[in-house]
Amino acid sequence: MASNSRMNIPAVLESDDVVSSTIPDEDIYPVEKIVNHRRMDGKLEFLIKWEGFPDEYNTWELESKLFCHDLISKYKKKNKTEIEKV
């Protein structure tokens, strides 16, 4: 069961990206996959499956907080019709 509680994850990279952050003391976690999407207050959010964490640690994240641009592009292309409905 997915949890929508936040893990205080400010930025995300794909597994094969170089891990770096310009924000001191902020961790960056790799994304395994995008599980789902929704709109909250008019903003698109994605349900993120974090690499190395069980599903109960999945979190809803604003698109603007994610750095996994390739995964987002692929997800949007695959789910274009569903995204337009929400």
Image (cartoon, rainbow, N blue to C red):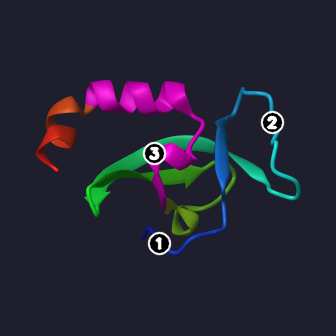
* Mark 1 lies on residue: 3
| Magenta range | 60-78
What amino acid type should be assigned to the residue bearing mark 2?
Answer: Val
**Mark seen at residue 63:** 3
Please tell me whether the stretch drawn in magenta is mainly helix, strand or loop.
Answer: helix
The answer to which image quadrant residue 2 occupies is bottom left
- Spatial CA distance of label 2 from label 1 is 25 Å
Residue at image position (46%, 53%) is 62
Question: How many numbered marks are there?
Answer: 3
Say whether marks 2 and 1 touch (CB < 8 Å). no
**Mark seen at residue 19:** 2
Residue at image position (55%, 48%) is 65
Residue at image position (87%, 58%) is 25
Above or below, 84 against 46 in this view is: above
Label located before the other in sequence (2 or 3): 2
Above or below, 77 against 42 in this view is: above
Q: Quarter holding the N terminus? A: bottom left
Q: Nearer the viewer, mark 2 or mark 1?
A: 2
What amino acid type should be assigned to the residue bearing mark 1?
Answer: Ser
Say whether marks 2 and 3 touch (CB < 8 Å). no
Label located before the other in sequence (2 or 1): 1
The answer to which image quadrant residue 4 occupies is bottom left
Residue at image position (64%, 68%) is 7
- Spatial CA distance of label 1 from label 3 is 18 Å
Residue nearest the viewer, comparing 83 with 54: 83
Does residue 75 appear left or right of residue 62 in this picture? left
In magenta segment, residue 14: no
In the rendering, at what x and y percent does residue 76 appear?
Answer: 32, 31
Q: Nearer the viewer, mark 1 or mark 3?
A: 3
Label located before the other in sequence (1 or 3): 1
Q: Nearer the viewer, mark 2 or mark 3?
A: 3
In the rendering, at what x and y percent does residue 63 appear?
Answer: 45, 45
